[in-house]
Amino acid sequence: MAFDIDRYTKQSEGVEWGDLDLDVFDEQPLDEPTLRTLRYMCDVEYHTVCYLRDLLTTPSHKEPEVGAFMTMWNREEFWHGEALAAVLAKHDITVDYDVLKARRVKLGWKDRLDPIKQSLLGNVVGHDFVAVHMTYGAANEYSANAAYHRLAKMVTHPVLTPLLKRIAIQESKHIAFYATQARKRLEASKKARVITRFVMSKVWQPVGSGINSDDEVTHVMTHLFRGPDGRKIIRDLDTKISALPGLEGLQIVEKAMDARGVPA
Amino acid sequence: MTSGGEGTREGGSDAGGRTGDERTHAPHHIRGDARRGAAPTGHAHAGIVETMSRTTAPERAFDVRAFARDARGSHRDALDLAAFVDAPLDDVSLRLVAVLHHVEAATMGRLRDMLVTATHKDARVTAFLVTWAYERFWIADALRAILDAHDHPTELHGRARFRPRELAERRGPVRRAIIANLTGTDVIAVHASTGLVDEWIIGEAFGALARHARHATIDVLAGIVDDVQSRHLDFLGQEAERRLAESARARRLSRRAILGGAWPIGAIHVPARARHLLERLTFAGAQGRLALERVRDRVAALPGMDATADRLAARLVA
Ligand SMILES: [Fe+2]
Ligand SMILES: [Fe+2]
């Protein structure tokens, strides 16, 4: 249950795909909906550094364990972006620094105000705001892990499936950190539980919602989670998230799917 | 919008610095100056062509992706920590190690200060920063291992120095974000140029540590730091050169940041005595004066930084 930060930092590395033969995509290319979903995932991964900025507005990064994790985590997510970009490039979809920059510039004032908003909120709420970040992070990592496993299973592709599984393994380490942190901080404070429950039930949206259009979010969620199998994964996610102290009974992921019309 | 929200605190000196600094405009080269002798030569990175970005500007010689791929992780296996049992470091060396650990370990805070500005939109710069932070983490870890081997505390105690001109360094993320929203992309030049100055000073401090400690393990560490830093210097140098050469505003903002800075970056939170120790060991004495001249010359070689370099050098020993 405890998260071994020394072990994690020592073992942290960029996800490896040099041994996978990407030329297989020439013979077995991915279909359009899969590429669209991968593009979304790739964006989310690369966007982590911007999300990190928001996490860093609370003083939690001064705790050595948190700072150490964020350093490694940020880099691992960057490499997830790189790996997916390499797959997309094999399908003539370019995600390079210029494309990413253009997208970040397009986010405009909302993006500029985010760190200010986060900081001010953090100052008002105080130290308990860290619990919100950790819980949010846990929910995001649970979702990422589930999404990669799901897509790996859906495509059963000789290259994409192993790559996605490798990424998912790293996501499960991220889950371990965030969930451990969230649990500890929620257990310690009633105020943290109340604020976190409020934020998760009112504010939380599927990963990537903030940076992608509604159409893209709906496409990805439907592509990955439609039908009974998908719905089962969604309910599992809710079970895990609502197992955190103070979040009992929440069904935020299923609600988000229903709101977007993802068929069960 | 000229000085924007940056205030006019340095206004008078800024104007003075401008007349002195704007005389030189020729393209400069940062690399190629004598690096410390103990350093391994490292990889030949200059000249590798950027493969990821479609942007074909010739100045984009630094391959960020290759840098990210070759990132240097833990150094613990390379350091003979057992050697400290028979030959421990003296107290002054340990205190310098603790100061260096303090500033290297504060990297997440620095990353935050940069990410709340337009710097975070430049994906090539953030790709660099992700790996830069990772490598600094492991330098801090190596320093920590040395402190641990001596049962020396990692925390520094005592009151920080107070200098009105360094007040800007105490800004929190909200003020930094608000100011940076007015400053725009010129802030990237400021982060590159101050990052460079920081790496130069840190590099000299490690050199001073090696000179003072006279210990094989510290020599190895200084060599590692030199190797790791060389790539940070390549990137930051290229970015600073280009961005400063392009924009008078970037030069003005950078001059102000360099002269308003507490060096190395993060020193603002270092207790006064510890900060003094770092400055004295690094820049006092015959060897220190040479170190100071090296820093001054490198700063002076940046576009528009002639007079700023002299003023910075004077402050580093004040
Ligand atoms: Fe990821
Ligand atoms: Fe993750």
Image (spheres, helix red, strand yellow):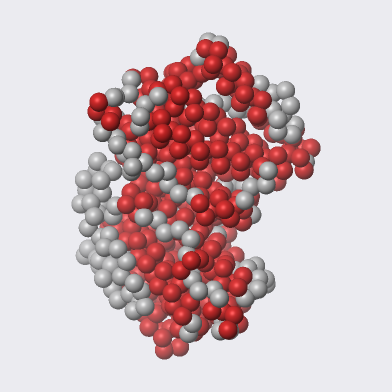
Q: Residue at x 50, y 41 (%)?
A: A170
Q: Quadrant of the C terminus of chain A?
A: top right
Q: Is B48 on the left-hand or right-hand side of A60?
A: left
Q: Residue at x 70, y 39 (%)?
A: A183
- The foreground one among A178 and B80 is B80
Counting from the top left corner in percent of width and height, residue B89 is at 56, 81
Q: Residue at x 35, y 32 (%)?
A: A159
Counting from the top left corner in percent of width and height, residue B272 is at 61, 74
**Position of B26 relative to A23 (above/below):** below
**Position of B92 relative to B198 (above/below):** below
- The foreground one among A225 and B295 is A225
Counting from the top left corner in percent of width and height, residue B248 is at 32, 56
Counting from the top left corner in percent of width and height, residue B148 is at 62, 70
Q: How many discs appear?
A: 0
Q: Is B121 on the left-hand or right-hand side of B170?
A: left
In terms of image quadrants, where is residue B85? bottom right
Residue A187 in sight from this viewpoint? yes
Q: Among all residues in the image, which is located at the extreme right? A: A190
Q: Quadrant of the N terminus of chain A?
A: top right
- The foreground one among B10 and B289 is B289
Q: Is B152 on the left-hand or right-hand side of B128?
A: right
Q: Residue at x 43, y 47 (%)?
A: A14
Residue B318 in sight from this viewpoint? no
**Position of B206 relative to B49 (above/below):** below
In terms of image quadrants, where is residue B27? bottom left
